[in-house]
Image (cartoon, grey):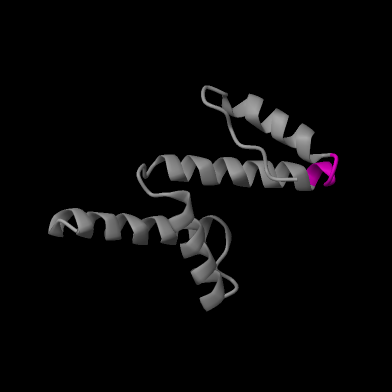
Amino acid sequence: MPIPQRTPGEDRDAYIGRCISELSNEYPQDQASAICYQQLKKMNMQEEVPGIPQEEIDYCLAMLKGQNPTYVGPGALKICIARLSAKKANQAEYGI
């Protein structure tokens, strides 16, 4: 089952409750909770940098993990957002 996405206007607590409820059929509650909080953190970080397509973020995360399997989670996401933001800024600066 895919990880539930937060719907527009859904507050944090409502999302977490719904997400855990949906995932608890497949995972123990502690795992479902961890997955949902991680997804919320990922979504919140992505909201900080609008205009970066999810595909680019996913590709960057895969490349990082391929370079070093320990590059996962929020740390890897921060690295990718920083890289992609810098790339976007350079493209804007040079009109690319």
| Quadrant of the rendering where the N terminus is positioned | top right
Residue nearer the viewer, 88 or 24: 88
Residue, x 42% and y 61% (percent of image)? 79
Locate residue 86 relative to residue 39 in the image: left or right. left
| Quadrant of the rendering where the C terminus is positioned | bottom left
Say if the magenta span includes residue 76. no
Q: Magenta: predominant secondary structure element?
A: loop
Locate residue 65 relative to residue 60 in the image: left or right. right
Locate residue 5 relative to residue 52 in the image: left or right. right
Residue, x 47% and y 50% (percent of image)? 54
The percent position of residue 60, horizontal first and vertical second, equals 46, 64
Q: Is residue 66 above or below residue 33?
A: below
Q: Extreme left residue here?
A: 94
What's drawn in magenta, residue-wise?
A: 25-30
The percent position of residue 58, horizontal first and vertical second, equals 51, 58
Residue nearer the viewer, 95 or 15: 95
The percent position of residue 28, horizontal first and vertical second, equals 85, 45
Residue, x 28% and y 60% (percent of image)? 87
Locate residue 20 relative to residue 54 in the image: left or right. right
The percent position of residue 86, horizontal first and vertical second, equals 28, 59
Q: Is residue 33 above or below residue 13?
A: below
Q: Is residue 6 above or below residue 82?
A: above
